[in-house]
Amino acid sequence: MSLILSRRDLDFLVFEWLDAAALTSRERYQDHSAETFHQVLDTCEAIATDHFAPHNKLNDQNEPQFVNGGAVTIPEVKRALAVYSEAALIAPGQLYEYGGMQLPALLEKACAVWFRAANIATSAYPFLTAANLNVIAAYGEDWQKERFIPPMTEGRFFGTMCLSEPQAGSSLSDVRTRAVKQDDGIYRLYGTKMWISGGDQDISENIIHLVLARSPDGIPGVKGLSLYIVPKFLVNEDGTLGERNDVVLAGLNHKMGYRGTTNTLLNFGEGGHRPGGEAGAVGYLIGQENNGLACMFHMMNEARIGVGSGAVALGYTGYLHAVDYAKSRQQGRPNGAKDPTTPQVALTRHTDIRRMLLAAKSYVEGGMALALYCARLVDEERTAQTPEARVEAHLLLDMLTPIAKSWPSQWCLEANSLAIQVHGGYGYTRDYNVEQFYRDNRLNPIHEGTHGIQGIDILGRKVVMQGGAGLNLFNATLEKTVARAKASGDETLAGYAGELHAALDRLNAVTATLHAINDQERTLANASVYLEAFGHITVAWIWLEQALAALGKAGDFYDGKRQAARYFFRWELPKVYPQLDLLETLDDTTLEMQEAWF
Amino acid sequence: MKVLVPVKRVIDYNVKVRVKPDQTGVDLANVKMSMNPFDEIATEEAVRLKEKGVATEVVVVSIGPQQAQETIRTALAMGADRGILIVTDQDAEPLAVAKLLKAVIAEESPNLVVMGKQAIDGDNNAVGQMLAALLDWPQATFASKLEVTADKATVTREIDGGLQTLDVSLPAVITADLRLNEPRYASLPNIMKAKKKEIAMKTAADYGVDVSPKLKVLKVTEPPKRSAGIKVADAAELVGKLKSEGVL
């Protein structure tokens, strides 16, 4: 049994529940078959096992160093990524014309989680590269696509996204980096970017930065932002590397986890290098001026779902490590058994250990199912038969994105905490792996839109967008599952369906109450609580879906699914009621708290 | 030059093997199956011969259930050109496998057979040797290095005392040991290409070979659990014990 992920569970979710094989009837995916899907997953599991997992701890213990103006990583990272690139895994979902293999998003996600779980830090480099090249593919001019995409799909160039600045993290409207247009239409950028993952490294030949910047005399706020391609080395027309661009590594951040991924402070245009004889980082506009936010959100939505699935992967591997430990570690005797001459029992014999493992199982398998469901929506968005179905898939994905990002970041992190708890004192030592998974995962509620931002997104934007169309679709989607469960003939599932429907009704009532007042600050004051309740209802639905997919199937695997669904409905879903009660009162305790009182 | 690579679908090397409660064999229900690792090495070597321009065609052959197609597909994704599956639900014994391979060779006329030294399920280490004997071809087993020219193969073999290098004239049977190479991963583009490659479906009857078992399995049991060690009082007692056990 792999401790990275459960292939059995992935096969269940991808093939039995989400019916990956049906996608091969879509034109974009017609060269594939269920058999190629299985083979691709075999390759991913093998490479993750042989080349990613073995240096995960080494990466953590040997974080990148700042040497002679550049970031130096351990050689294992480069070797692993060379194998990864050779297997054509950088952008397997892209179109053939961009060097991809038109793998469905569902399978691309099922592949990606192997690497996230095996070594989140090493896998960050190609995932950032994929997000980057997807933006260029979507918005770039032809010459930009031709020059930058092939070296990225081949793994020779890596990509980054440069949005934050020291004074502008969550607040992108305060981005100050300037982009000055020259007579030849090329831009020069000046400014400082903070928290840039992969901003410098010694793994790839070149680094393609996507940089959010503004025209010096442009519109203030987010509406004046544009997106630029800024390579570390300029790229000549024939694809060879040219002059060093004016992008300079100013420092490395020293993080709690994710240590193998360089995280950088970058200076643009301070004259550290002088391409064409003058200071200023050479940049090429992507799409239209002042349209940077739209381009960025293409990347950001993908990144947010990616953060969620990364959180799932880390939680999942932690859970598997805990199960493995609990099955083999003999400790203590069952409650009531006092005879010290009897042998000790395995940890799994203790109910409280089983409670923790069951909680973790419900979080990580629920999170994995949600992540894969979202990926399946991407496939619908791209290839559904009718334009209406494609629009609908897009809308539902838009609705679920803050949940897909935040829920695993909170609850699969909790699974990592439980994995440490199951290990006891050993789990708190660095001799075991579970503390690293926790530290690595602790990033996920923070980056690509903090938990707080996701709360504002779901309550302030998503439930009211298009006159509530997104919320209506969410309701209709859950109600379909409720109806199927009620019609399934299974009393237990029909019971869950009733509970889910009741919670959904309550959520809708509270949503209406929150938006009935004309005071946005108060409406959004407790948005994080709303986000949690919305997330738990979403995942309860996902568990009902899984239980339906397991209906009538026998064996330990399916019994485990049923028990985890039962756990979620008995223990987790009821947690939303006190949250919704609090929200309904429009409680202003936090809103009225004064700075001076802290 | 045509190279034939026999491949076997076996229980994955990562799986913890469990004996069936009735002791008739190993439990294969819901167990991950993969290509025998030594066959992966043999396939890799054949593909490298093709990439070097020595071989012109690599044909893989498997004997097993319908699902052994997946094993062949993996070999095709590594770079083999086409496959032959001889479908049998019977777990063919080494001699039957060797006879079937001999029959395939009579049809295909390869110049070289590269195969795993043994399959990790039965660990018999017999088919390569039997096949060479049936064909009356030279054999070089446990290869850790292989160089092939038009009419001979220079093979470095792993033997108890170290390494032995010998020349065999072609056609010949070579069996691969662990250190011969590191097999490649099936890349996504090659998986896609493999989908279009041909797999010929055959039966044992097509080759006139009787695969009914000649051996009888009495029972299959787990290896005995390791028993606890003993404490010795001093070094002299330890040396005495080692001598009496014949270790020293």
Image (cartoon, coloured by chain):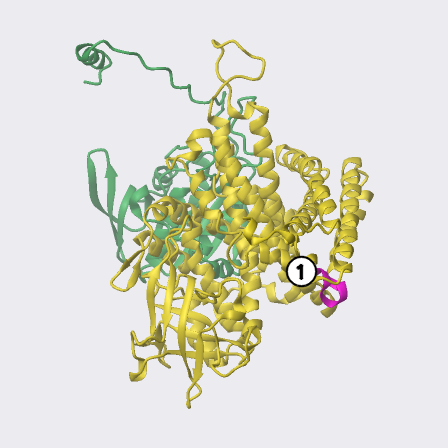
Q: Which residue is mark 1?
A: A521
Q: Position of residue A8 (x, y in %)?
A: 57, 42
Q: Nearer the viewer, residue A391 or A196?
A: A196
Residue A33 location, quadrant? bottom right
Residue at 53%, 51% in the rendered image: A445
Q: Nearer the viewer, residue B59 or A108?
A: A108
Asked whether residue A468 is drawn in magenta, I would say yes
Asked whether residue A61 is drawn in magenta, I would say no
B196 w.r.t. A598: above or below:
below
B24 w.r.t. A15: above or below:
above
Q: Nearer the viewer, residue B119 or A461?
A: A461
Tell me the kind of residue under disc 1: Glu
Element class at badge 1: helix
Protein chain holding label 1: A
Kindly report the secondary structure that dominates the magenta region of the rendered protein. helix
Q: Is residue A9 left or right of residue B146?
A: right
Residue at 49%, 47% in the rendered image: A441
Q: Which chain is yellow?
A: A
Dot 1 crowding, Cα within 10 Å, few <14, some 14–19, many 20+:
few
The color chain B is rendered in: green
Residues rendered magenta in the picture: A463-470
